[in-house]
Amino acid sequence: MNLDTREPVVHNLGVLETAALLRELTAGLIALTDFDEALLTLVRVTRDAVAGVRWCGFTALRAGEPAGVAASDERLAGLDDLRHGPDSPAMSAIRRREMILAVDLAGEPRWPAWTARARDLGVRGVVSAPVDIDDQVIGAINLYAAGPNLLTPQHQLTAMLLAEHAGLLLAAVRDRGRQAEMAGERDAELLLDGVIGQAVGVIMTQRGCPPAEALDVLRTAASSLDIPLREVAERLVRTVSRQRES
């Protein structure tokens, strides 16, 4: 079943187009901390930016086990998900650490079960490129064409550059995510601290804000006054105590 009846239009992919793709990816991923959100942004931007590519997917492994999948079209998500079978272009790219290309799935013998599913979904060509993210996570980005012989050597070059750039961006996303998680744990510890917790409670009452926002107010005050956070908290608690006593 062909999911998209539009006639594919293929243009020559040039340096400027590839540069624009990498720039758009950087802008889309540079502030993200959620890995799954980053994968979804990656495949959607790639699908829209690369001529001749109708769909895009990403396959991720963590410590050798399936760890995530993203698809520009949910109907094709199973093609990128190793839980539906490890014999696929993505897994070949990951195992061999090299680009995998099939320009016409009609005569492709390498992944019989996967190829049958892909053809039923309207896929006629695929290029998969391995993506190194960090010591724990690796993956492959998969570019799909809706017609045979649409994927050219230029698509392979684009996929190679895309994989290299995406690996760096996704590694940064995972690092920011870890830092945000650690910051959240530190905040939770601070909120349990006696005087700081009391000061946060005072600010929450005064401003009607949640704990995280109240803690940010306290941090801003400490930074502006150039004194430790605990000292600011102690001053605030003392001030409120005097006001209540008077």
Image: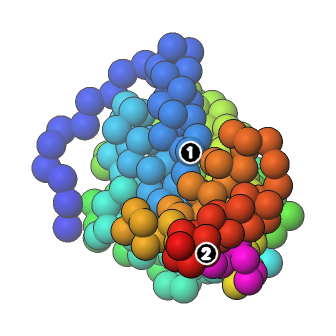
Query: For residue 137, which quarter of the picture?
Result: bottom right
Nearest the viewer among 17 and 224 is 224
Cα–Cα gap, marks 1 and 2: 41 Å
Q: Residue at 36% across / 21% down in the picture?
A: 11
Q: Secondary structure at mark 2?
A: helix
Spot occupied by residue 54 in the image (x, y as percentages of width and height) = 33, 46
Query: For residue 59, which quarter of the picture?
Result: bottom right
Q: Main secondary structure of the magenta part?
A: helix
Nearest the viewer among 141 and 87 is 141
Spot occupied by residue 111 in the image (x, y as percentages of width and height) = 56, 72
Q: Residue furthest left?
A: 5
Q: Residue at 57% across / 55% down in the picture?
A: 217
The magenta segment is 193-199
Q: Which residue is mark 1?
A: 31
What residue type is disc 2 on? Answer: Ser
Image quadrant occupied by the N terminus: bottom left
Nearest the viewer among 37 and 61 is 37
Residue 15 seen from this side: yes
Query: For residue 232, which quarter of the picture?
Result: bottom right
Q: Residue at 86% across / 64% down in the picture?
A: 135
Mark in front: 1 vs 2: 2
Q: Residue furthest right?
A: 135
| Mark 1 / mark 2, whichever is N-terminal | 1
Spot occupied by residue 208 in the image (x, y as percentages of width and height) = 37, 68
Q: Which residue is mark 2?
A: 241
